[in-house]
Image (cartoon, rainbow, N blue to C red):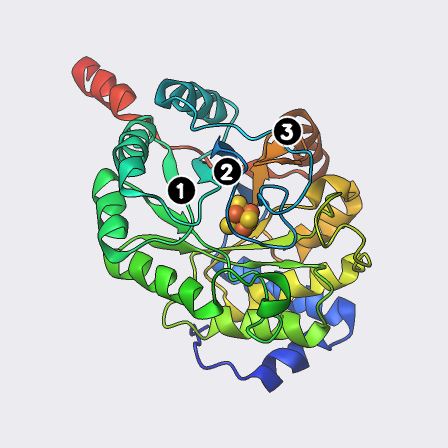
Amino acid sequence: MTVRNDWTRDEIQALYDQPFLDLVFEAQGVHRQHFQANTIQVSTLLSIKTGKCPEDCKYCSQSARYDSKLEAEKRIAVDKVIREALSAKESGSSRFCMGAAWRNPHERDMPYVLEMVREVKALGLETCMTLGMLNQSQAERLKDAGLDYYNHNLDTSREYYSHIISTRTFDDRLDTLDHVRQAGMKVCSGGIVGLGESRNDRIGLLHELATMPVHPESVPINMLVPIEGTPLADVEKLEVTEWIRTIAVARIIMPHSYIRLSAGRESLSDSDQALAFMAGANSLFSGEKLLTTPNAGEGKDQLLFAKLGLTAEKPKPSIAELTVDAMSA
Ligand code: SF4
């Protein structure tokens, strides 16, 4: 199957509007053509600087503009990050994602994040960061330090975007993604469903992602976790089937991308999650927390994997492990 970057909104809508079971069946077929069945890539996400963010994303507990009762934390020490990364690797994660609640990293933060990338990479983990907007020079330095992925979500459709964020534009987001691509890193970019948007907005988000010159290698499809104190605390809950439809369409139109279950997973039943895997999701975040929101813990995930006969993609050996192997060969 050729990868297409010329999807029209009408084509995406036609996929989205199919009978639910036809859509999930088609998505699973596409999935099996491009990925090993029953294998899930597992990532761990750590907040390296929490809260007091100057941005106004209306869903976020970390924005300084809302009274979400979140306890802000300063940058955490690099050696603590390394310990967390090691424990994530031992628990079966192959990728370690580090997130900071910044509009963008300041120059004074760069040595800190670059050292962190080098050290996490040396453990044999894939590295990912989400630090807000990047300029070209920052993207290049992160790439040189060994950063594999940069996460920067589009969040929602271009049309609905201004209802959710006013402190940076949709095009600012695309500019950062462009800098990440130019620097040669892989892109992790997706969105959130359940923000009060329409189905047409979910189609618009997918259209934006699937018509990028290169599809994001990783596409998180988050389900809103409403947080008290934020403007979206009381938004009407979206039907789970709409979230599954979004996953299935993402799988069909971006067949080589990892489609990731992110925020919102902890409130879903095992059977809802199984349906999401059936619809082509093949990546998830493990651990008790996703930055600040609760997540299905590792123990729960291991049980779910055992129940469904799923296996986690293997992490790579670290540089230290490879050196020992070479010396003993
Ligand atoms: S989503 Fe990110 S940029 Fe937006 S308020 Fe939260 S931490 Fe800041």
Q: Nearer the N terminus, badge 2 or badge 1? A: 2
Viewer-side label of 2, 3: 3
Frontmost residue, 52 versus 198: 52
Q: Could you tell me which residue is drawn at 69 percent across and 46 percent down?
A: 264
Dividing the picture into quadrants, the one containing residue 163 is bottom right
Numbered tag placed on residue 43 in the rendering: 2
**What SS does tag 3 mark?**
loop
- Please tell me whether mark 2 sits on a helix, a strand or a loop: strand
- Residue 15 horizontal/vertical position (percent): 65, 77
Residue 11, above or below 25: below
- Residue at the image point whose x is 29% and y is 20% from the top: 321
Kind of residue at disc 3: Glu
Q: Amino acid at mark 1?
A: Cys
The residue tagged 3 is: 288
**Residue 188 left/right relative to 16:** left
Q: Is residue 13 above or below residue 50?
A: below
Q: CA distance from mark 1 to mark 3?
A: 19 Å
Q: Which image quarter is the C terminus in? A: top left
Mark 1 surroundings: few (<14), some (14-19) or many (≥20) residues within 10 A: many
Question: Considering only vertical position in the picture, is 164 above or below 139?
Answer: below
Query: Looking at the image, is mark 1 or mark 3 earlier in the sequence?
Result: 1
- Asked if one can make out residue 217 in the rendered structure from this viewpoint, the answer is yes
Residue picked out by circle 1: 128
